[in-house]
Amino acid sequence: MSTLSDKVFISPARYVQGANAVERAGHYIAALGGRALIIADDLVWKMAGEQLAQSLESEGVEFERAVFEGEASRREIDRLVERGQQQQTKVVIGFGGGKAIDTAKAVADPLLAACAILPTTASTDAPTSALSVIYSDEGEFDSYRFYNRNPDLVLVDTAIICKAPPRFLASGIADALATWVEARGVIRADASNMAGGRATLLGRAIGEKCEEVLFEHALLAWQANQAQIVTPSFEAVVEANTLLSGLGFESGGLAAAHAIHNGFTALHGEIHDLTHGEKVAYGTVAQLILDQTPQAELEKYLALYVALGLPITLKALKLDQASEEDLYRVAEAALKEGESSHNLAYELTPQQIVHALRAVDAHARAFMDKAISRE
């Protein structure tokens, strides 16, 4: 067991990325075991299930598909663990978006099975990590669930991902832009990363590189996604969203941005129509404000968020009618015991978080007004 004085870096055993990579999935999965349980919803299966099935069959991997019902909840996980026990599963394959991926990791762990992750979007950094975000059946944040190892395989098919709605790529960019903002806050505080230790030089370098790649390539990648084509910039951003962000947040650490995201899940209403990354974008700007980030750097983030159509006003977040009580509920949830908001070098109060949420709205509207006046 590590202590906080130890530096800890963790990662998946193998990462594979490329156009049409799912056609080669059987080659990599066969090395993990010959009996697989595939967790995928109907939409994902219709889109690329036949390709995956043919690849597994060609390598002699037996498999069954379990339909994912949409929520990474305790009930869903328990249901699929029972299914895996019945078929003596050796490999659990998570095929789909972030919640299907987190569910697959949660199912593989008690089965002592290998875990292969095949994301169909680049919308989160969930694929590489040794944790799952668990929600209630109604979609409210419940807890983080940690595992003793990362996935055995992460296989990313950019030919599939480029056909996903560009909104998902933008969401992944927003999630990944939180990586260095949060990790540097954790490092300043000499707090623990998600692996239970301090950040290594490599963990820090990955977080910094993630931010650099995104500011250089994000818009070009988003435009390529709109055209449904794979370009070098698209490949770079998919890797940043998935691998660099995944390694960077886990071996760097989480802070206020993701805690505020978790706070948003305590609310009801239209905010739940937004993606994980869209809510994290707002939390990231809030942390930049709490960190007393210089205006030039803050506006660099705002400019990219605006260009990608991410929600950085309370109206865009569906909270323009939110009461002060609602915002305090977000703040109090973000400050619960064990939340990552406590990984900063300064203590936060609910009022400070509420003021930061309102400051994001004020600064974003002023920034956009200034941009319009220049036109």
Image (cartoon, rainbow, N blue to C red):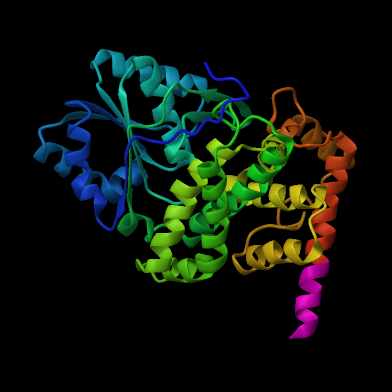
Task: Tell me if 232 is positioned left or right of 188 in this view.
Answer: left
Question: Which residue is depicted at the point 43% across and 32% down?
Answer: 69
**Does residue 31 appear in the picture of this structure?**
yes
Q: Nearer the viewer, residue 45 or 29?
A: 29
Task: Tell me if 164 is positioned left or right of 334 in this view.
Answer: left
Whether residue 59 is situated above or below residue 273 in the rendered picture: above
Question: Which residue is depicted at the point 52% across and 52% down?
Answer: 172
The magenta stretch spans residue 213: no
State the image coordinates of residue 335 (x, y, percent, origin top left): 77, 30
Farthest residue to the bottom: give it. 375
Q: Nearer the viewer, residue 199 or 134?
A: 199
In the picture, the quarter occupied by the C terminus is: bottom right
Whether residue 198 is situated above or below residue 320 in the rendered picture: above
Q: Nearer the viewer, residue 43 or 52?
A: 52
Q: Quadrant of residue 300?
A: bottom right
Question: Which residue is depicted at the point 37% across and 18% down?
Answer: 81
Question: Which residue is depicted at the point 26% across and 13% down?
Answer: 86
State the image coordinates of residue 342 (x, y, percent, origin top left): 75, 31
State the image coordinates of residue 58 (x, y, percent, origin top left): 9, 40
Task: Tell me if 207 is positioned left or right of 36 in this view.
Answer: right
State the image coordinates of residue 321 (x, y, percent, origin top left): 82, 50
Region of the chain picked out in magenta, as a range? 366-375
Task: Tell me if 258 is positioned left or right of 96 in this view.
Answer: right
Whether residue 152 is situated above or below residue 295 in the rendered picture: above
Q: Quadrant of residue 35?
A: top left
**Does residue 275 appear in the picture of this structure?**
no
Q: Nearer the viewer, residue 309 or 236?
A: 236
Q: Main secondary structure of the magenta part?
A: helix
